[in-house]
Image (cartoon, helix red, strand yellow):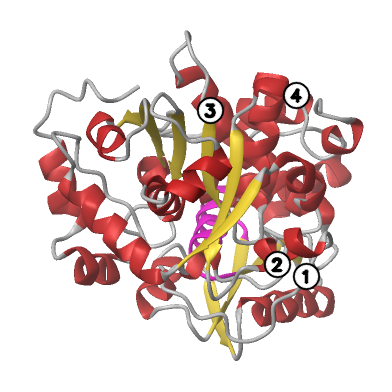
Amino acid sequence: MPYGREQSAILNHAGLEAARREISSWPEYRPTPLISLPGLARAADVGTLHCKDEGRRFGLGSFKPLGGAYAVFRVIEGEIRCATGQGVTGPELIDGRYRNIIGGITVCAATDGNHGRSVAWGARMFGCRCVIFINEAVTEGRERAIAAYGAEVRRVPGSFDDAVRVASEAAVIEGWHLVPDTAAGGNTEAAGNVMQGYAVLADEMVSQYPADASPSHLFVQAGVGGLAAAVCGQLWQAYGVGRPLLVTVEPDTAACWFESFKAGAPVTIEGELDSLMSGLACGQPSPLAWPILRPGARAAMTIPDEAAEETMRLLAMGVDDDPPVVGGESGVAGLAAFLLVSQDADARRQLGLEDDSRVLVVNSEGDTDPETYQAIVGRSGDKVRALAGKGDESWLL
C-alpha cells in the first residue's frame, strides 16, 4: 500500500525538512556513517549488510539527540514565539538570545538512559532547566551520564512506564514542559517532534545507500516504537511500495509490539520488564507510532539478552576483515535478530531472506554505559574504536 494520509499526518516531507534544517545547523552536526559489513554478510549468507552507526552522533553515543534535543528546541521556539511573535533558530538560542525567556523554562522527561541524556544535552545547549525521571533498573553509569549535562535526575520505583507516569504528573503539577519519546501520556505534539527528528537518521540512510540498489530487509529495534516508526515512515516515503520488508525487534521480556501485532491492537505488558537491552524495556507502544508500524511493519520478533551480548562481541571483533564497531546493548538488537534469522531455515523462508538479499540495520547506540560495555565485550569502547581507526575507512558510506 502507498504511504497514506494517516501516516502523513504524523511524519511528512515538510516536517522532515524543518527538522533537517534545524538539526544540521547545530555545532558538530554531521551525518553518521553507513557501514558496509561484507564479512558478516557472507557469514549470514546474504548479498549485502549495511549498518547505520549511531554511536558517533553528536558525541552522545546514540541516535537520541536527533529526537530529544530537537523536541526541546521546539518547546523553546514555541514559548519565544508566544512571547515575542518572532521565530528563532537553534544557533540564535546558543548565542544567548532570549536568555531571559529561556531561563524560566523547565523541560522534563522519563528515560531508561539515552532519551534523558539527549533532552539534558539539548536543555544545556539552549539554556533551559531540565529534570529527568529514571526507573529502578537504570544503571548508575547512565544516571551519571545524564547528570553530567546539568539535569536534575530523580529515580522512581517501578518500570520505565512508571517513570513515564510520574514525569507526566510532575509536568502538570509544576507547569513544566514534558518531552516524551512516547505519546502514551497523551503528549502527541512533543512525541511527534521526537519522531520527526529521528526521521533525519533515516533520510541520511537513504542518501548514503548505494544509488543502484535499495535495501530488501530492515531489522530495527522497537522500544516504545519511535525510532522504528520514524525509520519505517521515511523509507516508506523514499522507496514507496518497493520499501524494505521491516521486522521489529524487542527483548523477549518486554515485547509489547510483538504482542500488539498478534492482538491486532495496542497491548500493554505489565511487570518489571527487566532486560540487558534497557533502552527497549518498554511495556506500552506509543500511540503515535502505531498508525505507521501497524501497516508498515511486515514481521515482529523477540530476542534473548544473550543474543545481544554475543552480537556486541561479534561487532567489536570484526568478522572476516570487517571493521570493528562499538555497539551497545540496545543498539545491536536489530543486527542480533537478523543473525538469528539467518541461521534458521524456516525463519529465512518466512521472511524471504535469500543469498542476494540486501539487509539494513541500525546500531542505535555505542558504549553509552562504558562499564557494562567493557564487562560484556572484554575491552573498552575506546580500544575498539582505536582498532577501527587503523583501517583505510573505505567501509564508511
Kind of element beneath mark 1: loop
Residue 300 drawn at (x, y percent)? 62, 54
What residue is pinned by disc 2? 259
Mark 1 or 3, nearer chain start: 3
Q: How far apart are marks 2 and 3 (CA)?
A: 25 Å
Task: Give the mark toward the camera: 1 or 3.
Answer: 3
- Structural distance between the alpha carbons of marks 2 and 1: 6 Å
Was residue 125 drawn as part of the magenta stretch in this picture? yes
Residue type indicated by callout 3: Ser
Vertical placement of 249 versus 151: above or below? Answer: above
Which of the 4 image quarters holds residue 9?
top right
Which residue has dot 1 on it? 267
* First along the sequence among labels 3 and 4: 4
Describe residue 321's horizontal placement relative to residue 22 as left or right: left
Q: Which residue lies furthest to the bottom in this view?
A: 157
Q: Do the residues labelled 4 and 1 touch (CB within 8 Å)?
A: no
Mark 4 → mark 2, Cα distance in angstroms:
31 Å
Are the residues tagged 3 and 4 within 8 Å (C-beta)? no
Give the structural element (helix, strand or loop) at label 4.
helix
Percent across and percent down for residue 8 are 84, 32
Can you tell which mark lies on residue 223? none
Count residues near mark 4 (Cα–Cα under 10 Å), then give few for <14, some for 14-19, many for 20+. Answer: few
- The residue located at (83%, 54%) in the rendering is 188
Q: How far apart are marks 1 and 3 (CA)?
A: 29 Å
Residue on which the image places disc 3? 216
Q: Which is in the foreground here, disc 4 or disc 1?
A: 1
Is label 2 in contact with label 1 (beta carbons under 8 Å)? yes
The kind of secondary structure element at disc 2 is helix
For the record, the magenta segment spans 111-128
